[in-house]
Amino acid sequence: MVHSDHHPQNPLTRREASGVIARRAGGLFVASKTLIGGAALVGTGYWLANHTPRSRRDIPPGRTVIDYWEKWTGPEGVAIQLIVDQFNQSQERIWVRRTAVSEIDTKAMVAIGGGDPPDVCGVFSYNIPQYAQAGAVIPLSDFSHQNALYPRGLSTTQSMSPDHYAPAVAKLLSSHGKLIAGVSSIYSLALYYNKEMFRAAGLDPQSPPRTIEELDEYAERLTIKNQNGTIVQAGFLPNLPAWWPYSWPLLFGAKLYDPSTNAAGFDSDQTIRAYQWVRSCARRFGMSATSAFATANDRNYHSAQDPFISGKVAMIAQGPWLANFIGLYNPNLEYAAAPLPVAADLLDPQAPIGMLEADVLVIPRGCRNPQAAYEFIAFTQRQEVQEQLAREHTKSSPLAVCSPAFFAGHRNPYVQVHDAITRSTRVSVLPQTTVWKSYAHLTAGVFDSAWKGSDDVAATCKNVNVRVQAMMDRDSSLQMRRNRVQ
Amino acid sequence: MYNNRRNILTGLVWISPWIIGFMVFLCVPIGMSIYYSLTDYGLMDAPIFIGIDNYRELASDQLFVKSAFNTALFAAISVFMSLVVSLGLAILLEQHLKGASLVRSLIFIPTLVPVVANCIIWLWLLNPSAGVVAAIGSAIGSPSLNPLGDAQLAMPTLALISVWVVGSPLLVCTAALKDVPGTLYEAAAMDGMGPLRRCIHVTLPMITPALGFNAIMSIIWSIQVIAPPMIMTRGGPENSTLTFSMYIYKTAFEFGRMGYASALAWIQILITMLIAIGVLSLARRVIFYRGAN
């Protein structure tokens, strides 16, 4: 006979008794499930605690691991990984772990703001003013070279110095007299042209256009349209690609920014002339036809369908990396490169005009291993390392001195064109202001409206200049206020 | 009393993960964004309090005005087209036509495709040299048809493309149509109403709750639209497809002005709320709820 726990005086029926047994058995079952679940959790925890993640399996024990975010993938990613591997093998204290990151400047900004940045970050030189002003990166000139792997040519007592770089590059890497970043590569824009198309149009491939007037003439001769008016082959179009809408005024002698007075220069006569020329290009070849040609090729750059690589356009403004992609997708393409044509009154072959930009390496504030990060950056700034990376990226060297062997074995046959721009006395760098990204966005609007012919060019340029100046003034006053508060 | 309190406590414990998540991931960020909207804050440095300067700046910000106009244009076309197309298709598919289920499934498929894939498909369809649309344009004598490259056409084109994913509102309309009592149609037919009048006087009033729901959801989605213009046009040409959300994103993460972006976001919320309240008060007058007094 089974008795209830609470009412021993009332005997349970057989049915009630079997219910109690079932509930107890159920309770035991639940308890055993809880036990099994708990044991599984403990087991998983133990396994995880002793488990080495895949990303750390190859790291030799005892090394300080530094995280390095870099934007490059494909052949450019392979080239930077080679440098990372060389560094990892060159010593036994530090291990660099590279991660390819897209939209890197945005993600770096969020990571720094969130207090969990990588140790080294490969951003763009136009980020430096903003990062430096916000104190978001540790200036390289603040580091000591003690225990560091010194860049060749620098004494052990010296910090990494701007003199190590070509003057324009040093300007890009510095802010308020301090060296903020190391360089990973540089680029300038040049005119790449298809020699075969030149010959077919009766032009001499050895004589590329040198002035804007010549460029217009060549473009006209090289452009082929079908019966419908659709462009089959473009000679030269400034909207192909429209990645540097702010670069055209430089070819007319404009200065986009005067750092000494913190003044925008987007309303100058040269700037207005530049965008009037942009408008004339659209009118000459037809706004609809040129826009359609550009839109059709908008997603094809740096692929086998790239309009220049696939022979749809005869001349294009591009950076030195184009040689890399030509080698990859169409190695038989007959091409050459020359400095971008300029306004006739500015022509001086000894001092080409061009715009220089750099990919830079910074050490974010709040990173875990700043000294180790500095050692890695110092390693990358060595002449042989820089030249190796530049060769792999088909770019010119950013350093003040180039080794004689650099050009001999270079994979870009026209690297000297870019090198001449880098070292030219008339090379420009992007406005070193914290509002540059907003400024650049507005210039894209000016380029578009000039191309479509929707607004008066001079009025648009003046309007943008007023807006940019207001942004810069606001930023300056806020910075002064910020300095007072701090 | 004791049991009641204990039940409440037990309930709170069980929903505590949600409450904690709500507080940490929603309430705190909302509060912080109100504060940031009153500061100059660039993410990487400490915010500096500047009062309502960010809101004052909106008045003279041409890109803000442009992006607001673009978003309104997108919303107007997209909401109208979405409502008309979903309702039209739902009514058509309720006519017991052969293959209606298959067509309904086919219409719903784009809703299941990720938005990026949808955008890439449309980029190819609209490609001026290799796209189907350009081929049609060429056949009818418009060889350089390039809607995404034209400042006047780009935003209407994006709005029309948004109708591609009309599957969800279509399902809502279909469910509402199935819920209309057949007796009402019989009575209307006995009163001599033809199909068109039955549709206007019986069907539409009976499905107004579904239409109201579709309208509000579509408006909210349209005001927040970001992915299609970001992927397909990057805001161009001439900023003609720069939407409000895209401008907020660019301001925060490209231009590094989180404070100003927060102010923009609050204006967006305010506009969305005002529109939603407007639509709801209109709905109270227009929508017919069966069973309601």
Image (cartoon, coloured by chain):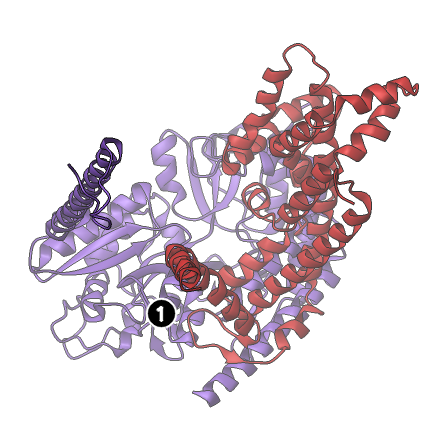
Q: Which chain is purple in the rendering? A: A
Provide the secondary structure element on which disc 1 rests.
helix
Q: Is B165 located above or below residue B277 in the figure?
A: above
Picture coordinates of residue A159, whole percent (x, y): 22, 76
Answer left or right for B5 relative to B208. left
Q: Quadrant of residue A283?
A: top right
Disc 1 marks which residue? A170
Answer left or right for A56 relative to A137. left
Picture coordinates of residue B193, whole percent (x, y): 90, 21
Residue at left offset 31%, top offset 64%:
A116
Q: Which chain is red in the rendering? A: B
Crowd tier of the residue under label 1, counting other residues whose Cα lies within 10 Å: few below 14, some 14–19, many 20 or above: many
Residue at left offset 19%, top offset 56%:
A96
Q: Chain letter of disc 1? A: A
Is residue A228 in view? no
What amino acid type is highlighted by mark number 1? Ala
Q: Is A47 located above or below residue A471 in the figure?
A: above
Q: Quadrant of the C terminus of chain B?
A: top right
B23 or B127, nearer to the observer: B23
Residue that lies at the very extreme toward the bottom in this rendered image: A484
Picture coordinates of residue B134, whole percent (x, y): 66, 26
Picture coordinates of residue A172, whole percent (x, y): 40, 67
Q: Quadrant of the N terminus of chain B?
A: bottom left
Residue at left offset 48%, top offset 39%:
A193
Residue at left offset 56%, top offset 71%:
B34
Is residue A66 in view? yes
A330 or B137, nearer to the observer: B137
B179 or A443, nearer to the observer: B179
